Amino acid sequence: MNDAPRTYDVVVIGAGPVGENVAERTKAAGLSTVVVESELVGGECSYWACMPSKALLRPVIARADARRLPGLSQAAAGPLDSAEVLARRDSFTSHWKDDGQVGWLDSVGIDLVRGRGRLDGPRRVVVDTPGGESVVLQARHAVAVCTGTTAALPDLPGLADVEPWTSREATSAKQVPESLVVVGGGVVAVEMATAWQALGSRVTVLVRGRALLERMEPFVGELVADGLREAGADVRFGVSVASVLREGRQVRVGLDDGGELTADEILFATGRRPHTGGIGLDTVGLADGGWLDVDDTCRVTAVEDGWLYAVGDVNHRALLTHQGKYQGRMAGAAIAARAKGEPVDDRPWGAHVATADAAAVPQVVFTDPEVGSVGLSAQEAEQAGHRVRAVDYDLAQVAGASLYGDDYRGRARMVVDLDRNVLLGVTFVGPGVGELLHSATVAVVGEVPVDRLWHAVPSYPTISEVWLRLLETLRG
Ligand SMILES: Cc1cc2nc3c(=O)[nH]c(=O)nc-3n(C[C@H](O)[C@H](O)[C@H](O)COP(=O)(O)OP(=O)(O)OC[C@H]3O[C@@H](n4cnc5c(N)ncnc54)[C@H](O)[C@@H]3O)c2cc1C
Ligand SMILES: NC(=O)c1ccc[n+]([C@@H]2O[C@H](COP(=O)([O-])OP(=O)(O)OC[C@H]3O[C@@H](n4cnc5c(N)ncnc54)[C@H](O)[C@@H]3O)[C@@H](O)[C@H]2O)c1
């Protein structure tokens, strides 16, 4: 053990997208900063989540769009070249090598210590390196825990022997299984079912509840389920896995309704758990393995003296890369302000708080049809005590949408706060809506009065004209 501590202003544990952003902000503010990483710099997002999944999905969605256009549909009628799709996916993960991201850390002057970091009392981090050494890091001002999440698996006897797919295998598999069972009805389930079905697997989706994407507006799950079924997937609701057994190359899956399935692989897309086990939380008075509660500057509320921050997935505010990076920018700025004795602007929407986490989290789901949503659903808004009106519009009635593809199907909803005359949430479902979402995010975050939205004129003939139709529907 190398006991002599190396002292930095800021120590960041975990170099995923969020840890990188915290470090970038504190370093840019003139604070010496070190990041600790146990696997690959860039984190889950770069190698086993956002990037590989979207690289798999992009050709799937492009082909689906092409198939809706006479003159092009014939050319897009054939199967995807799965080898080419997987090869392009591999290039987007830099073949699971992090040299590029390490080069970026070097270029901005952030130090990297490879190994598993753990807290060892206030402001002190011990890193167990791959070479068996221990490196001690002492923070003058702050430690930021940015260790993310791992897949949560259900407690099924014999599950480990089956070697199930998690999001890691679903995004990095080198071959297309002939058949795949997907368990879960969340974002990972619907995106990965979309990808592997299009790449040639026979996909069965097992949803224990009654809908897909349950946290979104109810019509979202219905349209995504229709899309999956039309693509050939078998989507079943109200069914859970009761047993699993690997027999040769097949997995035998017993269902709680007495049914049985066999498939080459089974993917559990059943949520996430925090990557906080064994990272020394107990040495600073916190429970091992839990989510970390933070204030709006991402400072851990239960720790004295305010030196510990938890940023990104690990604080459970919004499990999304863009939202975690936003938290990273805010927390990094707050750490720097506090270190320099400067005022911290922690009023809502201030320079040092992640206010949007509660009011305006945007998310795009890359299925066919795509989904884009921001802010509160109508049900969430009502439960929060707002007096709201949900305004719906059939996207097929928008000229730009019908030009986008024949037999266009989609829907839009805006949730209007009737007392303040602003939008609390917006949801779009339909081909090509992902790039539309930021207009809604700006409207919600900016609390743009509905009367002023009338002056934001959408270009003709784009899908964005749905904004005008929603306003007309609201006015009656
Ligand atoms: C299949 C899938 C697809 C997704 N797609 C999207 C998407 O399209 N858009 C989107 O916004 N979000 C997406 N997400 C969510 C996104 O991946 C996460 O929100 C994001 O990765 C969180 O970033 P993070 O930095 O908090 O954590 P992570 O990316 O998990 O990074 C944490 C890092 O900490 C390291 N670490 C952990 N423990 C230690 C330790 N003790 N010492 C040192 N290092 C440690 C890990 O090795 C890792 O590198 C997806 C998730 C999945 C599973
Ligand atoms: N495009 C994107 O933005 C994107 C893509 C993928 C993932 N993500 C993020 O990653 C996070 C994780 O996604 P996820 O889909 O793994 O989690 P999730 O929480 O969104 O969905 C989990 C699903 O599994 C089901 N489930 C949980 N336990 C189960 C069990 N024991 N048996 C059967 N079903 C069970 C739940 O009912 C739910 O349908 C999400 O918060 C999401 O925001 C984002």
Image (cartoon, rainbow, N blue to C red):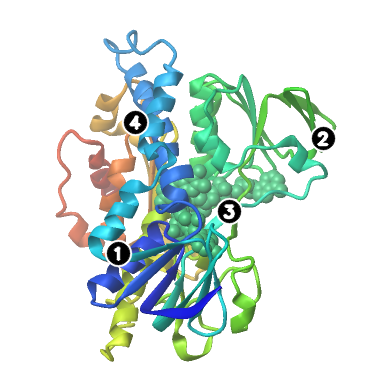
Residue where numbered disc 3 is placed: 150
Q: Is mark 4 within 8 Å of ligand 2?
A: no
- Between marks 4 and 1 in the image, the one whose residue lies nearer the viewer: 1
- Residue 462, by quadrant, is top left
Hey, which quadrant is residue 311 in on the image?
A: bottom left
Sequence-earlier tag: 2 or 3: 3
Q: Position of residue 43 (x, y in %)?
A: 44, 53
Residue bearing mark 4: 396
Q: Nearer the viewer, residue 12 or 399?
A: 12
- In the picture of the structure, the residue carrying the numbered disc 1 is 445
Label 1 crowd (10 A; few <14 / some 14-19 / many >=20) = many
Q: Position of residue 71 (x, y in %)?
A: 26, 10
Amino acid marked by disc 3: Thr
Where residue 92 sits: x, y (%)? Answer: 36, 37
Q: Around disc 2, counting alpha carbons within 10 Å, would you say few (fewer than 14), some (14 to 19), or many (20 or more)?
A: few
* Nearest-to-viewer mark from 4 and 2: 2
Disc 1, disc 3: CB below 8 Å? no
**Location of residue 318 with respect to 141 vertically, above or below:** above
Q: Nearer the viewer, residue 347 or 19?
A: 19
Name the residue that disc number 2 marks: 257
Q: Is residue 307 visible?
A: yes
Identified at 47% across, 50% down, the residue is 44
Amino acid bearing label 1: Val
45 versus 2 height, above or below:
above
Which residue does the image show at 32% across and 9% down from the upper left?
75
For residue 435, side relative to residue 132 (left or right):
left
Counting residues from the start of the chain, the first of labels 4 and 2 encountered is 2
C-alpha distance separating marks 4 and 1: 27 Å
Mark 2 residue element = loop
